Amino acid sequence: MKKFKKLTAILLLCAMVFHLAGPGTALKSSAAKKPVLNPKKVTIRVGQAKKIILKNAKKAKKTTWKAKPAKAIKLLKKGKTSVTIRGVKKTRKVVLTAKFKLGKKKKMAKCTIKVNAKPKDNVTVKPTVVPTDKPTVKPTVIPTLPPTEEPTEGPMRPKQPVQSARPFPSDYPQIATLPKTTSIPNLLKFFKSQKDVTAENWKDRMDEVRELYQVYMYGMYRSGEEITAERSDFTLNQNNNNVTNLSVTVTNEKSSGTITAAITLPSGEAPELGWPAMIGFGGIADPNKSRLLERGYAVIDFMPNQVAPDQAGRRGIFYDLYPYGQGTYDWKNQTGALMAWAWGVSKIIDGLETGIGDELNINQDILMISGVSRYGKAAAVTGAFDKRIRVTVPGCSGAAGMICMRYDPNKLTFNLSSLEDFAAGADQTCTYGPIGNDRTGTEGFGSLTSGSEAHWFNTTFASAVSGYNGTNVAFPFDQHFLAALCVEEDRLLFGTSEFVSGMWTNAPGHWMTYLKAQETLKVVGLEDNYAIRFHRDGHRLQVEDIDYLLDFVEFKLFHRKPKKNLANLGTSLFETNAENKAAFESKMPPSL
């Protein structure tokens, strides 16, 4: 009897505990502690990468990952609590197993994967633009995020479209019918409808601007080819960095060709999301390459002549795939070399996205593009038409790059002594000559339409300004339009120009572009995403430019505290020196 009473008391106590805890508590607690793979079921395509997380197993040890069938997927970045997979072969079911230890116990978790065939066309996702305040006039680049000492890994983004996916209209007027003007066109007014641009319709205006550049200047942007990619085994360079060659084969109904790029990785262990990367037109040389690697950026050297040689004739891989159309106004079948080179960079990015980028631990959410001179023009075009480029860096790009085509600094003198790279004993001033002057003049349309440069553009462009060195032109845009295409809520633009050794690059015209871009970018609150820096001498990106660039990028995208004073990137000697400012403003063209 006593035993019965004792057992009854125990049962009553257990019932009270169960009642107080609530139904299902014990079951939930047990389930919460069970390690699982997340997601448990996943569908990917051939070439696509996906990260699988081992949840509820933070203290897992000696994790081994296996797939069955093994040849259907490739296991990349194998860690204790995660693995990145890449689809290799179309398969209805792959079982991924994680075996590990929790304490002294052996555990196992599984998930199933379906691998679909790779689609032939690129998928595009339309980005959103966040509306903000109305425009003001004063341009500055002032840090707007509270800096922290500890870096973050940086934001992840949804897959970005290469360019607008909307149907391309055919009713643009011929350039000969448009009025010529020395006034700067208004980015805040639609070309066709003449409607005012607001934060709400900003994206539509940007789509229209991309069309205008394709019709009247750079030619058609192309996409949608079949892509396959492979890479070579690693070799070591003189600094013991791993180097591999990426080969991307591009095929359409007309032809096929292979584009290559050399990829150099930083030393040490990659960040969790991988190395951010700088793609360099024509390659990136030391000391800039070493500085990028030291600061944890992969370097991708891309030689554009393999896509389209820098010469008249329209030959190379691009023109095999997309033969150049004949006829003055056949703009739908015409692409200039600058746009062809930009397309080549997009194909390199396509190659990374087959899974090779994940295999190399490259963070494909933070890709930068840089170039100098004609390649500076190409860098700007690339950033304008491929939204996967996170940071666009056109250096000393001159006319048809970042320079206002309607700003002529002829006869203006500027004091250079406030520049950071000004050396004692150097000439303190520079005076600009007429457009087209070999030594002191700025680059004009006469140069751009000469036999050595006309192939950079489409035939429509050359027909409008052939041999002309002036500012009275019919183009319904100026280059702050191009700058605006490179900037979005999470995309940055960093431009540089020089003075003494490259007066033809027209540093005052670059400042004019910056001012007009700032004025219009304020419509969508993006003015802080455009930075500009001038140096006295050197037709190149200086290592000091690289330091400023990376501080700017890391502050805006990673929230790291900058070492440089980023306020310097929102001003110039055209603003801080009273005499320089007066001279600059004396030649400012009116605006439409």
Image (cartoon, rainbow, N blue to C red):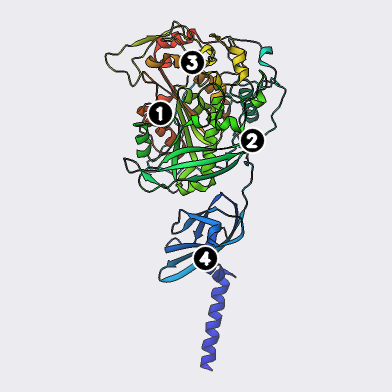
Q: What's the mark number on residue 109?
A: 4
Compare marks 3 and 2 and give the one earlier in the sequence: 2
Q: Which residue is mark 2?
A: 254
Compare marks 4 and 2 and give the one earlier in the sequence: 4
Residue type of the residue flagged with mark 3: Gly
- How many residues crowd mark 1 within 10 Å: few (<14), some (14–19), many (20+)? some
On screen, residue 116 versus residue 351, left or right, reads right
Residue type of the residue flagged with mark 4: Ala
- Residue 496 x, y percent position in the rendering: 43, 23
- Residue 288 x, y percent position in the rendering: 36, 32
Residue type of the residue flagged with mark 1: Leu
Q: CA distance from mark 2 to mark 1?
A: 49 Å
- How many residues crowd mark 4 within 10 Å: few (<14), some (14–19), many (20+)? some
Q: Is residue 584 visible?
A: yes
Q: What's the mark number on residue 566?
A: 1
Q: CA distance from mark 4 to mark 2?
A: 48 Å
Q: Residue at x 63, y 10 (%)?
A: 180
- Residue 125 x, y percent position in the rendering: 62, 40
Q: What's the mark number on residue 509?
A: 3
Q: In the picture shown, does residue 342 fall above or below 354?
A: above
Q: Nearer the viewer, mark 4 or mark 2?
A: 2
* Rendered image quadrant of residue 169: top right
